[in-house]
Amino acid sequence: MNIYCLEDFKVEFDKLNSKKSYNSFEQEIITYFFGKTKEELCSGTRLNFSTEAPYIKKRLNGSGGFRCYFLMIIKDENLYLMFAHPKTGSMGSSNIDNKSKAYLYKKVLGCIKSNDLYELKLSETGESIIFKKL
């Protein structure tokens, strides 16, 4: 599975990663998204009814943890991380509204078309994520 993200996701990732209270975020992303099959990645709340390109909201680290929104293009084996946010702490917020979900969906489709994405890879040690602009 190839993993990409929008700049929105990278910006939020960098903010969260810089806060000591959210130091588990990067590991949560690594644990859930890397080295998994598409069937394993399809768990979560489906925000559309597509089987070829499911749009999913995933709860990471339990109910007070993080929310991650992503699109999987199953036929191409690609996963696109769109946005993430913590539920608690200084940067915590409630789930995003339907208007924001629709905006992210349209934005990711545009970014896929224009190749305005970052590719995510694991470091050699597998302990951190490396972002590479396409």
Image (cartoon, helix red, strand yellow):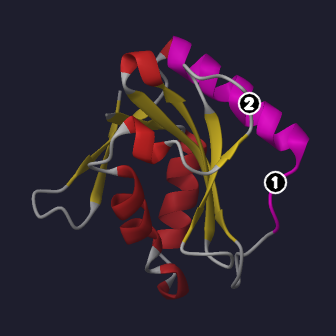
Magenta span of residues: 94-113
Q: Quadrant of the C terminus?
A: top left
Q: In x, y percent, where is residue 133?
A: 36, 34
Residue displayed at 39% across by 51% down: 33
Which x, y percent locates residue 9?
Answer: 56, 49
Give me the residue at 50% from left, 60% from top.
13
Look at the numbered disc 2 and give the secondary structure of its residue: loop
Q: Residue furthest top?
A: 113
User: Is label 2 or label 1 in front?
Assistant: 2
Secondary structure predominantly adopted by residues drawn in magenta? helix
Q: Would residue 98 be counted in the magenta stretch?
A: yes
The residue wearing badge 2 is 48
Q: In the image, is residue 65 above or below residue 46? A: below
Rendered residue at 81%/32% (across/down): 102
- Image-based side of 87 in relation to 70, left or right: right
User: Hey, what amino acid is under mark 1?
Assistant: Ile
User: How dense is the environment of label 1, judged by Cα within 10 Å: few (below 14), some, or many (20 and up)?
Assistant: few
In the picture of the structure, the residue carrying the numbered disc 1 is 96
State the SS at label 1: loop
